[in-house]
Amino acid sequence: MNRCAVFGLPLLLSVTGCTSGPPVRIYVLNPPLEPALGRVTPAPPPPAAATPGSAAQLQVLRVHVPDYLDTTDILLRDGRNEVKPSTTGRWGERLSEGLTHAVAADLVARMPPDSVVLDASSDPRRQLLIDVNALDLWPDGRCVLAASWSIVERGPPRSAATGSGNFDTSPAGREIGVGDARLIEAVARTVGKLADAIALQESPRR
């Protein structure tokens, strides 16, 4: 037998073995939209025709996360100083984008209608900046989020309301390897607690 063919066989088998197994699942933090039932939301007016109500609108800026977290890998804590990516699941978008969309959706559900936006088309006067200092996801389903935020008034006089906190979602029992879907639910619940704190700070404005 040709020597090259003999040496090439183990490599071929190794590559084939690596590509076998169940497909990697893709996850997002936002739940699916409910059917609109024929309702149409009119487009907002251009900035020049913005209504006085835009002064109360809050624009959610892209969430800042540590560089190592801003990936599509679902990273799990493994020991004191190590993180490992899930081999069976991935985020559908970079974590900073997913957290931004999730926080905005949670705030929409907690605040008055049309008071939360993601872009500047309605000329909102206030902006929400969130810095995630840590997002630790453990194999047993526990998620710990440490974040600080500020709500900045655009234009002079420039002022800001600030807040910070640690938000923890613990599993019902001690279980190792709960699966990606349960892990994503834990992150979503923890982000919801962050949105609760921000909405509570905003409640005096209502």
Image (cartoon, helix red, strand yellow):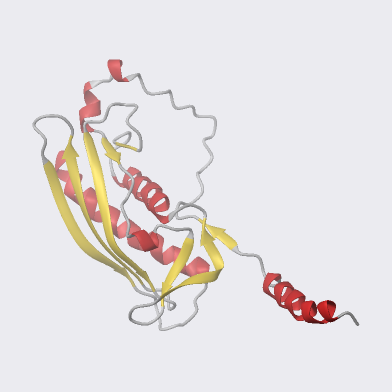
Q: Is residue 129 above or below residue 154?
A: below
Residue 59 locus on image (x, y percent): 29, 38
Q: In front here: 80 or 129? A: 80
Can residue 133 be seen in this snapshot? yes
How many numbered tags mark residues here? 0
Can residue 206 be seen in this snapshot? no
Instruction: State left or right for residue 69 relative to residue 12.
Output: left
In this view, the residue farthest toward the front is: 3
Quarter of the figure with the N terminus: bottom right
Q: Quadrant of residue 82?
A: bottom left
Residue 81 locus on image (x, y percent): 34, 78
Residue 63 locus on image (x, y percent): 32, 50
User: Which residue lies at the image location 34% right of the left edge and 19% below the top edge?
Assistant: 46
Q: In front here: 144 or 114? A: 144
Quarter of the figure with the C terminus: top left
User: Which residue lies at the image location 30% right of the left edge and 42% below the top edge?
Assistant: 60
In this view, the residue farthest toward the top is: 49
Instruction: State left or right for residue 69 relative to residue 54.
Output: right
Q: In front here: 52 or 177? A: 177
Instruction: State left or right for residue 61 relative to residue 204.
Output: right
User: Which residue lies at the image location 51% right of the left edge and 35% below the top edge?
Assistant: 36
User: Which residue lies at the image location 40% right of the left edge and 81% below the top edge?
Assistant: 173
